[in-house]
Amino acid sequence: MVVYDKYEAVIGLEVHAQLQTNSKLFCGDSIAFGALPNTQVSAITLGHPGTLPKTNKKAVEYAIKLGLACHCDIEKDNYFARKNYFYPDLPKGYQISQHTTPICKGGFVTIKTNGIQRNIQLNRIHIEEDAGKSIHDIYDDLSCIDLNRAGTALVEIVTEPDLYNSEEAYQYITELRRLLRWLHICDGNMEEGSLRCDANISVRIKGEKKLGTKVEVKNLNSIRNVKKAIDFEIKRMIEVLEANGTITQQTRSFDASNDTTFAIRDKEEANDYRYFPDPDLAPFHLSNEYIHQIKNALPALPQERMQQYQLQLGLSEYDAAQLCDEIATAEYFESVIAYSKHYKAIANWMFGPIKQQLNELNSSFEKISLLPKTLADLIEIVEEGKVNFSIASSRLLPILLKENIHPLTLAEKLNLIQVSNNSELEKWVDEVIAKMPDKVLEYKKGKKGLIGLFVGEVKKLSKGKADPQKVTVMLEEKLNKV
Ligand code: ADP
Ligand code: MG
């Protein structure tokens, strides 16, 4: 039997995130996904001689935003370098990247696994351009090339070898993706390739300081696959070592059809990329003032807000996490709490009926037209008992999601105001009791659970307007008396 517990895994992740700039990193070509192949390819993208690239300021700003959100040091004196290698989908024969001066250094991303919080240390975040795409599955005997993606702005976020199992890796990417989306700098869509992850994995005997030989697994197009690939590799490498084998430093690929990895090439020695500063691009200096300006404009980050919601508003960790899953949700919530102190009710409304109806309308909190004040008013009339929750959510909300009316006015117009007036309630209650003599008898004989049935009948008769609590009390009184 193989003793897996003797070993410890060490993981470092390299994540490429496509920046949501309007145009490419060094020219005005569009980066829209799904365009016809090779239609977003100017002479600069194609690397024609005599063309001059120009740095996209937005890309630099986005990288700084991310760096600040990850507590990195921002490099003030930057330049771009040419990383020379030949690749069919790299039309220039070199990739423009940052070399000795990544724009962000150090920093960390905070994750939580099994209730324990930990900072995953980053090595760096740098800016670089994406390559095009080779497509091998259209023709048997030909490969196709689509250069639309070539030159798209990327940030590469590189961790230290500071993750120790697949669950940590899973949480790390989830948190990183939330941050990227929160800052509106990347859509985080792994299936479309706007977020890509390479996992570097090694194992060593527990207590050993020196890192083991690593393998790098590429082509991980979902967070779940990152997890599966890591688990597979850890097991595979331990088994190799236990059989007295040695680990070869390799680049491997993940096969999603059977959750395994396979070697694509051995890495005998480091490539010589012959880096040198790109002579066509001026080095760029970032002033303290500029960095501060970006820092001041950063929104409150998800973990910060989650804490506030728990400590200051008394919400559960679960509710806080749901609210902070996306910035649009948190912002909507905050716009409602400006008008209402029913924090828990707001969260319940948002993740209950509102979310459900937004889904049906193919909408979202980003596009919601229900004014925060209107939702606050709706919650208020429910809390005051003027309209009950089920009527408010099933009858009023669908209308309020489309037009802006005061919820109380609407409830009055539709004759949905809850009736708590005793004499009106009594009429319904008496009618129900008179209608169901055999049930009344059963109740009296001890089948107390029937109370729900009576309440339901009153509800029906009143078209949902009877105050259920009062009705219950009144029914119990009468049934126990008759
Ligand atoms: P390479 O030059 O092969 O790309 P780097 O030193 O740049 O290697 O590291 C790439 C990633 O691999 C980083 O995230 C780093 O933390 C991780 N890494 C490096 N060595 C190991 C190792 N022995 N085990 C696990 N991860 C490692
Ligand atoms: Mg690498």
Image (cartoon, rainbow, N blue to C red):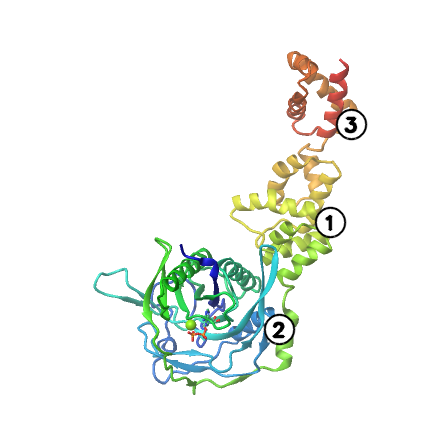
Q: SS of the residue at dot 2?
A: helix
Q: Name the spot of residue 193 as percent of width and height, x first.
A: 42, 62
- Residue labelled with disc 1: 340
- Image mark for residue 294: 2
Please report whichever mark, 1 or 2, sits nearer to the chain's N-terminal start.
2
Nearest to viewer (mark 3 / mark 1): 1
| Three-letter residue code for mark 2 | Ile
Which image quadrant is residue 324 in? Answer: bottom right
Please report whichever mark, 3 or 2, sits nearer to the chain's N-terminal start.
2
Mark 3 residue's CB less than 8 Å from ligand 1: no
| Three-letter residue code for mark 1 | Ser
| Three-letter residue code for mark 3 | Asn
Q: Name the spot of residue 7 as percent of width and height, x first.
A: 47, 62
In front: 37, or 74? 74
Please give the name of the residue rendered at 73% of the width and 43% of the height, measured from the top-left corner.
Answer: 380
Q: Is residue 402 visible?
A: no
| 164 relative to 316, above or below | below
Q: SS of the residue at dot 1?
A: loop
The answer to whether mark 3 and mark 1 are in CB contact below 8 A is no
Q: Residues within 10 Å of mark 3 (few under 14, many from 20)?
A: few
- Residue labelled with disc 3: 421
Quadrant of the snapshot with the C terminus: top right
